Amino acid sequence: MDTTTDQHTPWVLQFTHAQYGPFVDCARQYAALFRDTPYKVCTVYLTGAPDEAVIQGSASDEVVFLNQSKQQVRGLKLRAIGKLRRLLGTRRFVLCIAHRAKPIYIALLASQLPVIGVHHAFGDYQRWSRRFFVKRFKQRLALLGVSDATCKNIRHCMPDWPDWPEHRLATLYNRVDIAVLQAQQLSRKQARVQLGLPADAFIVANVGRLHPDKDQALLIRGFAQARSALPAGAILTIIGSGRLDIPLKALAAEELPSESVRFLGQVDFARRYFQAFDQFVLTSKEETFGIVLLEAMAAGVPVVCRDDCGGGAEVAADEVLFAADAASLAQAMINTAQTRHFPYYTKALEKFTDAEARIRFKRLLQQFAIHLP
């Protein structure tokens, strides 16, 4: 940990729980809010060892790994609080952005900074202890949800908080760096070769954990009903792994010919392969945001999204939403396969960008009454 004292340059502390899954890109997104400003960003990972790829992906002026174990981040988290306090004493920090409940808790106890807590999941305030804690610090804590659905869920968990300031809860959508994402994506031919997919087939795809929340069972049934009206030789391709691997394969064997469905298992950096698809379908019961839809749109792939999934429906346009039953899904898949123009692409890809988020974030700082020097 760097202990060089810097009391002149203003720093923003970004504190996140882990470096797996989407959280490195979340760190990049929030570091990007301060690009071309006088503020430097120090991103701190509560768990996980130093990793060069994480450092590069965080796009921050400095990256610190507290390297706490699962056991150490249970209970009072005194060791993590002490480490963070020592870091805070090394320079002039003016704001903390904390992702998820544990970093919010540690940041509030380790500092006197204004803290913006970012929530990426539903149900974060179902525990009374968390509700009690953040209420205690409401004067210097503001909350962000990554979608309107996330904020609605936070409010739903707070019915006994009539005095929680309405202006200190707001939405700041997740976003993608379109240029970087498109540069990472393989061509249609390359992606199909690497995934082992036929060059001329119509590919309907889903990417996600094989878990009840993702509801790939609905996807299989919907595709089975739509298949005869889709281009000849259509193939359903499911990327991901999880505890429903065997049941979903059994359902697919009942509903579909073996040549019309492919389970590809876990594929690292799956977003690189999206140009292999002709249609992307999101059947999740719950999505706080649904960044996978933007990854599909950036590849030029038409999307179909379940209308009651939460944040995902906020990303997709009304014309590509379907009700949570196989017949509605089948009709949406057929309609999308027959459509040639998707004007919602441009609107969505402009709305969910770093540039748009910077404009929104400046307004939110005023709304939260956070005045940076």
Image (cartoon, rainbow, N blue to C red):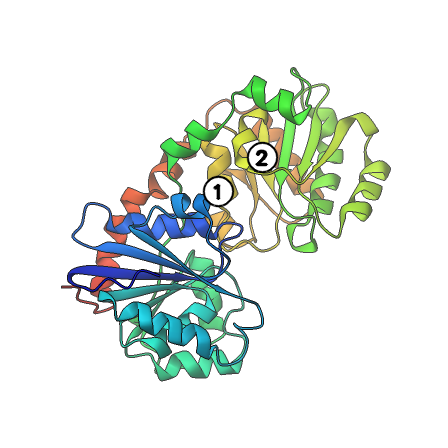
Location of residue 331 by image quarter: top right
Q: Amino acid at mark 2?
A: Phe
Q: Nearer the viewer, residue 238 or 17?
A: 17
The vertical placement of 191 against 87, above or below, is above
Mark 1 or mark 2: which is in front? 2
The residue indicated by pointer 1 is 318
Expressed as whole percent of the image width and height from the top left, the position of residue 148 reads: 42, 58
Expressed as whole percent of the image width and height from the top left, the position of residue 77 reads: 48, 77
SS assignment at label 1? helix
Would residue 248 be found to the left or right of residue 285 on screen? right
Location of residue 194 by image quarter: top right
- Residue 175: in sight, yes or no? no
Q: In percent of the image, x 31 and y 57: which residue is there? A: 42
Q: Residues within 10 Å of mark 2 (few under 14, many from 20)?
A: many
Q: Amino acid at mark 1?
A: Asp
- Residue 310: in sight, yes or no? yes
Contact, mark 1 vs mark 2 (Cβ under 8 Å): no
Q: How far apart are the alpha carbons under marks 1 and 2?
A: 16 Å
Q: Which of marks 2 and 1 precedes in the sequence?
A: 2
